[in-house]
Image (cartoon, helix red, strand yellow):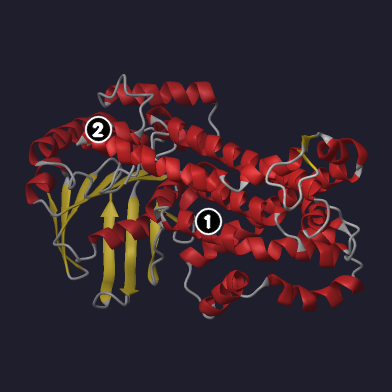
Amino acid sequence: MKKQGKGTYYIIIGILLLAFLLPFIPLVINSFAYNFRWPRFIPSNVTLRAFKYVFYENSNTYEAILNTLIIAISVVVIDVIIAVPAAFSLVRYEFKGKFIIKAVLFAPIIIPSFTAIMGMYVVFIRLSLTESIYGVILAHILPTLPYMLKALMVSYGTLDIALEQQAMVLGSGPISRFIYISLPHILPGIVTGASLTFLISISQYFLTFLVGGGKVITISIVMFPFISGGDNAIGSVYGLLFSSLAIINLILIDLLLKKYYKKRYFKII
Amino acid sequence: MAKLELKNICKKYESEYTEPFLLTDIKLTIEEGEFLSILGPSGCGKTTILRIITGIIKPDSGSLFVENVDITQKPIEKRNFALVAQQPLIFPNMNVIDNVAFGLKMKGISKGERLDLAAAMLSKLGLKGLEKRFSSQLSGGEEQRVAIARALVVKPKVLLMDEPFNALHEELRINMRELLHNIHKENRVTTIFVTHFKEEANFLSDKIVSMSKGKIDEIKKL
């Protein structure tokens, strides 16, 4: 029985791995391929041309990586600053119009964010936030904030008020209470929200292109022309670069969470 | 350690889940070093009185005096009380010694000193050797003793206990009762102890307040 269970486990893992890795196989083949066109089934030669182009000849690549990271990290930081007090108030307090505020905050999940950006664009022009990295950062907050907020609301929802009251009675003011009691509790939520925010931010093409006006170069921006009908090999290399950013992010988050749960012997409910 | 007075405390409570609740004209004096028990059935308002004293609930009218100073408007964290609730409420992200030292840390006592004080308090409560554990690695009785240590170590003006032994089984409850009795004889911290067990109140208290339906029925000195 037990052996069989293990067998199914490996089969399921195998299927999942295959499903996850399958799209990467043509990506890898493409990135090394030379003269790989229909009706050929295998490339006629192996070449590092695309890698050379991406990492040596195109000076935009490093600027794009840097910009992508700057934007994603700034968006994460701003989202945390906005979402922590927002999630706290939405979970703890009952007030008039709470439903409307919630609906507005979570709307970007349902309504495509460029509909909102179209309107904000006029204001952005007036504030000369277009064609600037600050404008792009602001625009990226829109589609990412709901995910950060949701993750934090779940975390705050499981924080016992009595625990905070206990700290209060022991002489702890609002700031120390946040640092020693709330923050450790919501940290997994912050980490989860941050990883989602990071992933959504790096995959934005339209918002970045519209607000950045082609002046703010991110990986999505440089990658897009190549994958939409340009050079497939170069597109694939950018694709690999893009995925590695995402995967590094996920691995880092995973390590952080594992370390956190190992350090603090949390009761698993 | 201090004298605590409740003067004409009133509190109306409306909740969507329960019947409206009224706490009427509570007058109570707890002398310095006294052990006072509030006895009554559940829903009689004894926990509400305790929460009003801690400051978690604000009374509608009436005032609270410690050493003849009005503290009704004083923020919770400045009152220098300590609370042991029914649930031990051990901070899950800190180990036992950090939990016990937390109140001292909030008072700005240096690390070395507060860890010494906390360790001494832990061994007084028979918790020596558990300093590095987390709450998930403690038994119910141990957790509640950590909570008592955490409350006593700050030398509170008043120690408030809200049915602290209810979650424990019979035998352990009797042990804890005796432990608490000895600790009180030794330290003489002004204590208010809420319970619905008569024998618990009789065993521990200098004075028993019987309550029902938001009113004090009688105050009995033992």
Question: Residue B220 appears at what percent x and percent y?
Answer: 12, 54
Q: Secondary structure at mark 1?
A: helix
Q: Which residue is mark 2?
A: A3
Amino acid type, callout 1: Leu
Question: Residue A232 appears at what percent x and percent y?
Answer: 78, 50
Question: Residue A51 appears at what percent x and percent y?
Answer: 81, 37
Q: CA distance from mark 1 to mark 2?
A: 40 Å
Give me the residue at 87% from left, 40% from top: A53
Q: Secondary structure at mark 2?
A: helix
Give me the residue at 55% from left, 49% from top: A192
Is residue A267 in view from this perspective? no
* Quarter where residue A176 is shown: top right
Give me the residue at 34% from left, 48% from top: B3
Give me the residue at 86% from left, 53% from top: A217
Is residue B132 in view from this perspective? yes
- Subunit that carries the residue with mark 2: A
- The residue lying furthest to the front in this view is A39
Left or right of A60, for residue A8 = left
User: Please, is residue A111 above or below residue A51 in the view?
Assistant: below
Left or right of A171, for residue B191 = left
Q: Which residue is mark 1?
A: A152
Q: Nearer the viewer, residue A188 or A67?
A: A67
Left or right of A205, for residue B115 = left
User: Please, is residue A78 above or below residue B129 in the view?
Assistant: below
How many other residues sit within 10 Å of disc 2, few (<14), some (14-19) or many (≥20)? Answer: few
User: Please, is residue A256 above or below residue B119 in the view?
Assistant: below
* Quarter where residue A136 is shown: bottom right
Cβ atoms at labels 1 and 2 below 8 Å apart = no
- Subunit that carries the residue with mark 1: A
